[in-house]
Image: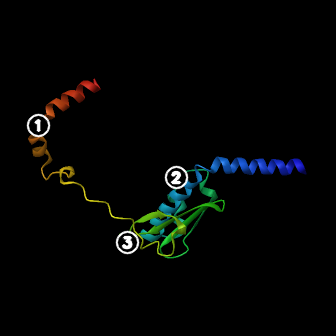
């Protein structure tokens, strides 16, 4: 009996050690896909699993939509990940302990790009003005691939 108990503990520790780095990825991916399928595409929660990639962990995932703005996924009852619908109609992963206003707490806006980093209205003319030689690029690529 003692041997069986020790073997069970060793097995449990081994499984936890193995799943440690990959489980949050699996649950996060499933929560994000689940949110998009269920809340954004407005499909039944049962249609989430067929959208997930072939993976031996998928049958061990539990995917739930506890309200009308979140999807929570766990693996074997642990490694919880939550995705919420955002104000722009997409989904994002959040820390489920952030509080009740998950759907309205969008991340800080990205700063606008500097004007010199924007794509010009006429990229070909801008490249020519900058001294870009498309024939030299083509010759370099041809040389590299031959």
Q: Which residue is pictured at 44% across the width and 63% down the height?
A: 92
Can residue 41 be spotted in the picture? no
Q: Assess disc 1: are there few (<14), some (14-19) or many (≥20) residues with their C-alpha within 10 Å of its C-alpha.
A: few
Q: Using the numbered discs, state the Cα–Cα distance from disc 1 to disc 3 in whole angstroms.
A: 43 Å
Q: Which dot, 2 or 3, sits closer to the camera?
A: 3
Q: Is residue 94 left or right of residue 130?
A: right
Marked residue nearer the N-terminal end (2 or 3): 2
List the residue tagged with mark 3: 87
- Name the spot of residue 57 as percent of width and height, x first: 61, 53
List the residue tagged with mark 2: 53
Q: Using the numbered discs, state the Cα–Cα distance from disc 2 to disc 3 in whole angstroms.
A: 28 Å
Disc 3, SS: loop
- Name the spot of residue 113 as percent of width and height, x first: 24, 55
Disc 2, SS: loop
Disc 1, SS: loop
Q: Which residue is pictured at 48% across the width and 66% down the height?
A: 35
Q: Is residue 74 left or right of residue 113?
A: right
């Amino acid at each position: 009996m003692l041997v069986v108990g020790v073997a069970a503990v060793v097995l449990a520790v081994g499984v936890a050690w193995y799943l440690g780095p990959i489980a949050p990825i699996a649950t996060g991916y499933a929560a994000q896909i689940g949110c998009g399928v269920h809340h954004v595409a407005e499909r039944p929660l049962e249609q989430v699993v067929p959208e997930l990639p072939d993976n031996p962990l998928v049958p061990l995932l539990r995917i739930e939509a506890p309200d009308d703005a979140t999807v929570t996924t766990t693996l074997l009852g642990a490694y919880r990940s939550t995705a919420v619908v955002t104000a722009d109609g997409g989904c994002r992963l959040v820390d489920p302990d952030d509080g009740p206003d998950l759907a309205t707490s969008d991340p800080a806006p990205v700063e606008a790009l500097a004007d010199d980093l924007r794509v010009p209205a006429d990229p070909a003319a801008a490249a020519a003005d900058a001294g870009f030689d498309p024939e030299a690029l083509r010759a370099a690529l041809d040389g590299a691939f031959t």
